[in-house]
Amino acid sequence: MATINISLPTPMYQDAKAMLRIRGYASISELIRQALRDVLYPKITENGFTPEFEEKVLRAEKSSRKHDVTLTSAKEIKDYFTKLKVPQKSSPYIQKKNKLKRHL
């Protein structure tokens, strides 16, 4: 990351500090980075997507899914993943050995 120094007129600096409180920025640097993104990448949304892709993401998020699962505790998460059956990939050696067994 590069570091730069800039000079601001006092009223602009005060406005920037006020904007930190209003918009919730952590620092002047964060505010300036966002302002540069807005100028340099005007077609990218606040979330870093193109407007079209962000619209698809937001639409998908709103739609309900019949088979969605909501896990609300560490136990539920552990139980869910313990019950999953993950297909195991076998090495070419094991595949060859299994093929040989089938012929015997």
Image (spheres, rainbow, N blue to C red):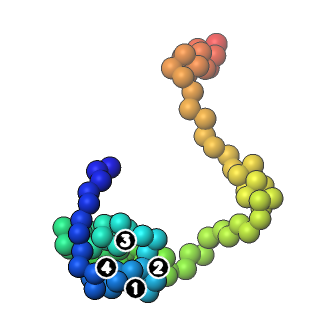
Q: Amino acid at mark 3?
A: Ile
Element type at mark 4: helix
Which of label 2 and label 1 is nearer to you?
1
Label 2 with label 3: CB-CB less than 8 Å: no
Residue 24's disc is 2
Amino acid type indicated by mark 2: Gly
Label 2 CA crowd tier, 10 Å (few <14, some 14–19, many 20+): few
Q: Up-down: is 104 above or below 7?
A: above
Q: Position of residue 10 (x, y in %)?
A: 28, 81
* Among the two numbered marks 3 and 4 on one chain, the one whose residue lies closer to the N terminus: 4
Q: CA distance from mark 2 to mark 3?
A: 11 Å
CA gap, disc 3 and disc 4: 9 Å
Residues at circles 3 and 4 in contact by the CB criterion of under 8 Å: yes
| Chain-order first, disc 2 or disc 1 | 1
The residue that label 3 is drawn on is: 28
User: Is residue 8 or residue 87 the one in the foreground?
Assistant: 8
Q: Secondary structure at mark 2?
A: loop
Residue 66 left/right relative to 73: left
Residue 18's tag is 1
Q: CA distance from mark 1 to mark 3?
A: 10 Å
Q: Are marks 4 and 1 in contact (CB under 8 Å)?
A: no
Give, as a three-letter code, the residue at label 4: Tyr
Quote the CA–CA distance across marks 2 and 1: 10 Å
In the rendered image, is residue 24 in sight?
yes
